[in-house]
Image (cartoon, rainbow, N blue to C red):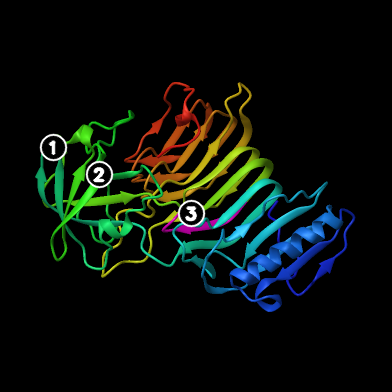
Amino acid sequence: AVFGWVPLFLTAVASAQGKYVHIDINSTYGISENGIYSAVNEAKRHLEQSCGDQVELFFAAGHWTINQTMPGIDLSQIHPCNDGRIIISGESYDTTTLSYTNWHQDTLYARNAHKVTVQNIHFTRSYQTVTQGDLIQNDPGSVVIRLHDGFPTPAELYDACFHAGRFIREYDQNTTDPKLIANTTETTWPPTVNTQLPWNNTIQEGPRTWRLQYLHGDARRVGNFTVGNVIGVKSKQCAQAYQFFDGDDFAFFSVRWTKISRGVFRNISNVHLANTQILRSEPVEGRVPCMSTYAGGPQFAGDDTVEGTSNFTVVNHYAVGTGDDSLAFFNTHNVTIRNSYIRDSFARGILLNGTKASLINNTVIRCPIYSPPRCTTDECRTST
């Protein structure tokens, strides 16, 4: 069931299971960092007193820019009981957008939370998170690109707080729907065509011309790229779309992400995603970005026990051009992915690490569905 059906002019509606409490953040507190913080605290206080109620924090229609100094929406230590629930809701993902400004702060965060729904909303960032340019030199140990107009420089995207996650891959010259250069029949990882290469240093060689130097292990390597094609530049940053640690029963319904989409469910069972989207952002100087985000999409990670975590359902997930795995599962059980469309992911379309999944009527293009052997290192918990 999708929560949030109660008419929005009602403040509280009694039912046999408890009340449905509606908090309109804009009219009550104003949609700002302080206003959201106050509304979340009101919801927490209410659920401490009446844990069986459903409390909706509602964001009215509009494009709301949130100047951040802390995680955008912190739902830690929320414990509804019975049919109680905390609900973060907009009017729709077409009409309610939250745009966050701090590239070191998460959009959503929770530790030890239960019964959480996020629905009918679009999360984005106020700044560009990826860059790209035409390949003009393909040298041993480096490439030189001429940045497309309006895109940030690689140096501007370099976030020292993230120790890894800087790679390049090749795309075609389509300005409205760029596609990854790939062997469409390949199911292994890493790919044999257009292998991602790690960069770690940048040198500006002209007004819009930059050399990207590879890590030491690839210092003499020549990428299998074609001069004249587009190089997409990925540089991970510390901000995440969401990070949820320890808890149970999370749901995302009709949620859209642009510019930032990597989120983690760690040691959380019973997660349901339906009608979710990861889209490329608006064109930059007439060009649609090759990548929608600088990292992947939803990640579901169990612990290192045999049991792991269980009960994950992803239905109608639509993802184009994510900067890493569009969906990733690590040591999880009872996984179903159905009616989902994924293409041009920088890495795997679906990664199943230590996980068996029921895959039903999905379309995955130019990025593999990949299942490596079960591992026992940190790679079991996260992907770069």
Q: Secondary structure at mark 3?
A: strand
Q: Measured from the top left, where is residue 98 in percent x and y?
A: 53, 67
Q: Among all residues in the image, which is located at the extreme right?
A: 16
Residue located beneath label 2 in the image: 199
Instruction: Tell me, for residue 277, which label it has, or none.
Output: 3
Residue 311 to residue 87: above or below: above
First in sequence, mark 2 or 1: give its number.
2
Residue 367 to residue 95: above or below: above
Relative horizontal placement of residue 3, taking residue 374 as reference (left or right): right
Residue located beneath label 1 in the image: 222
Q: Secondary structure at mark 1?
A: loop
Instruction: Tell me, for residue 235, which label it has, or none.
Output: none
For the residue pair 202 and 72, the one nearer the viewer reads as 202
Q: CA distance from mark 3 to mark 1?
A: 35 Å
Magenta span:
252-260
Q: CA distance from mark 2 to mark 1?
A: 13 Å
Q: Measured from the top left, where is residue 176 in percent x and y?
A: 28, 61
Query: How many neighbours does mark 2 have within 10 angstroms: few (below 14), some (14-19), or many (20 or more)?
Result: many
Residue at left offset 59%, top offset 30%: 303
Residue type pointed to by label 3: Gln
Residue type pointed to by label 1: Val
Report which quarter residue 196 is drawn in. top left
First in sequence, mark 3 or 2: give its number.
2
